[in-house]
């Protein structure tokens, strides 16, 4: 079965003092309803329920299936705001995608689903998602694909190849470093060989199910204003049926799609770069890019930022952070004319974490914007929401390294300076070492509409070291605390990285 995105592990006070006695209401955003106190005092006993319908969107037809929750650890926690104690109410998940937690008092709960916590006063949760491609099988064993083809436009340094299959939802890149990669001036592929398991979404292809193997030449070009970019140019479409772990060969001719288009943006890269020190005072800028693609309208609520390849335009012309007005960028379009064009802009940042003398672990985050492509052309492209401000562990500034925070620590923050956050997601990572390298493992992801979360029992362990990523989300009409895998356009996201902290 296709590995649903639901199953993926998708994110200060005095020393030794926990956070008991600090009421969540202290940090409630002014946009949150103030009726939670009355719900708690009524003492009503309720039932928490959830459903998990996954819709697979494929060219051969859409299909909706339940996501099997029978192996999911389901617990609803309540927290006493006076004592700080959590009370656990065990629940169950079922193969039909439903879950249930009986006899839960009213008020705010932390609904635990594996390592994910949904912090909400709600009692009904939609855990479904929409995913690009049919329900298939991911390749995990080395599965070589060899391509021989004619019809390339003379190959240029900077060109690359995209692999995709619209029906299967498979996609990935083929760049330098593989056998038979084309040399400058080449107009054909002769024995190009790559490992399909290395693709970003390596769904096993089956021509009997309607899958088509597509290989696109993404060509380096220059816009009307002299900005370099890469765009869809020519495409090879052919049939293939793969067996995991076994090699396969394809051949054919690249042709140029008849449909063309243009895309132009006023890209305010400086507005993203201006937020670097808000991500973390020591954050390092790494990349900035814009992608433009197209997808079926049914993927409007897809979990992924972009439904995947094929990209029509990829813009990351240089390492500068200065603003760019690109002028028209042209592309050839092999996709159905009815598909919705969407665009993503992102700026990447990193921070390093090290335990002792081990080689540091580098954590990457971004500030990103997802909108319809028409919105990118109609107005300057800049962040829709900025990073949260003044992050705290308990009541101490979270950018510094902290010890003695307790196993019942809280994470708190103020609203972003730019935009309006509709939700927040806190990812907690535990640091470790392996073979001389520092490692990071996500141990919890907490979704909330508040400006604080308390870490439930078991998240922090004595003797361990942690850091957190606090994401601010702008996504009107979608509540990540009750529908964590639903997406909508427009949306924006920005991250903050804390220092290290330990109980």
Image (tube, rainbow, N blue to C red):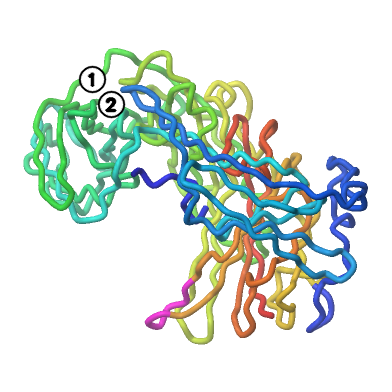
Magenta part of the protein: which range?
A: 434-439
Q: Position of residue 62 (x, y in %)?
A: 40, 25
Front one among 296 and 256: 296
Q: CA distance from mark 1 to mark 2?
A: 6 Å
Q: Residue at x 35, y 37 (%)?
A: 135
The image quarter containing residue 109 is bottom right
Q: Considering the whole magenta stretch, tell me its main secondary structure.
A: strand
Q: Quadrant of the C terminus?
A: bottom right
Left or right of 37 in this view: 350: left
- State the residue position of label 2: 233
Left or right of 495 in this view: 291: left
- State the residue position of label 1: 256
Q: Residue at x 46, y 46 (%)?
A: 95
Residue 13 drawn above or below residue 126 = below
Marks 1 and 2 close (CB-CB < 8 Å): yes
Is there any visible trace of residue 279 in the rendered image?
Answer: no
Q: Position of residue 84 (x, y in %)?
A: 83, 69
Q: Residues within 10 Å of mark 1 (few under 14, many from 20)?
A: some
Q: Position of residue 265 (x, y in %)?
A: 53, 28
Front one among 225 and 261: 261
**Residue 18 sits inside the magenta stretch:** no
Q: Residues within 10 Å of mark 2 (few under 14, many from 20)?
A: many
Q: Secondary structure at mark 2?
A: strand
Q: Position of residue 326 (x, y in %)?
A: 49, 29
Residue 166 drawn above or below residue 317 = above
């Amino acid at each position: 079965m296709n590995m649903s995105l639901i199953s993926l592990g998708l994110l200060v006070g005095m020393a030794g003092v926990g956070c008991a006695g600090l009421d969540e209401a202290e940090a409630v955003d002014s946009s949150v309803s103030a009726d939670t106190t009355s719900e708690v005092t009524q003492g009503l006993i309720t039932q928490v329920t959830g459903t998990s319908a996954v819709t697979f969107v494929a060219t051969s037809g859409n299909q909706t299936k339940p996501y099997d929750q029978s192996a999911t650890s389901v617990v609803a926690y309540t927290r006493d705001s006076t004592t700080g104690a959590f009370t656990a109410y065990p629940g169950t998940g079922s193969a039909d995608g439903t879950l249930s937690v009986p006899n839960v008092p009213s008020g705010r709960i932390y609904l635990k689903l594996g390592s994910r916590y949904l912090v909400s006063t709600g009692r009904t949760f939609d855990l479904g998602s929409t995913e690009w491609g049919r329900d298939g099988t991911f390749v995990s064993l080395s599965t070589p694909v060899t391509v021989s083809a004619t019809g390339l436009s003379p190959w240029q340094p900077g060109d690359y190849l995209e692999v995709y299959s619209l029906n299967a939802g498979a996609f990935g890149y083929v760049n330098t470093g593989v056998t038979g990669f084309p040399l400058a001036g080449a107009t054909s592929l002769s024995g190009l060989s790559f490992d399909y398991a290395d693709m970003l979404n390596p769904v096993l292809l089956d021509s009997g199910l309607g899958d088509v193997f597509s290989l696109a030449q993404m060509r380096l070009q220059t816009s009307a204003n002299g900005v370099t970019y890469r765009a869809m140019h020519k495409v090879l479409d052919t049939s293939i049926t793969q067996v995991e772990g076994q090699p396969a060969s394809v051949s054919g001719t690249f042709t140029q799609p008849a449909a063309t288009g243009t895309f132009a943006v006023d890209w305010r890269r400086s507005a993203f770069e201006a937020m670097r020190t808000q991500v973390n005072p020591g954050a390092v800028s790494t990349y900035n890019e814009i992608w433009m693609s197209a997808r079926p309208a049914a993927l409007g609520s897809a979990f992924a930022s972009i439904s995947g390849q094929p990209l029509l335009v990829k813009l990351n012309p240089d390492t500068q952070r200065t603003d760019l007005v690109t002028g028209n960028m042209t592309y050839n379009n092999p996709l159905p004319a009815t598909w919705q064009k969407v665009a993503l802009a992102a700026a990447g940042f990193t921070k390093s974490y090290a335990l002792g003398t081990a080689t540091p672990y580098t954590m990457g985050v971004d500030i990103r914007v997802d909108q319809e492509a028409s919105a990118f052309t109609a107005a300057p492209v800049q962040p829709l929401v900025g990073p949260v401000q003044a992050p705290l562990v308990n009541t101490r500034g979270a950018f510094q390294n902290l010890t003695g925070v307790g196993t019942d620590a809280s994470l708190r923050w103020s609203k972003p300076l730019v935009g309006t956050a509709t939700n927040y997601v806190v990812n907690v990572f535990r640091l470790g070492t392996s073979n001389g390298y520092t490692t990071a493992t996500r141990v919890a992801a907490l979704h909330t509409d508040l400006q604080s979360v308390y870490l439930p029992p078991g998240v922090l362990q004595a003797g361990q070291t942690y850091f957190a990523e606090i994401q601010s989300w702008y996504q009107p009409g979608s509540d990540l605390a009750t529908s964590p895998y639903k997406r909508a356009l427009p949306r924006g996201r920005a991250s903050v990285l804390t220092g290290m902290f330990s109980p």
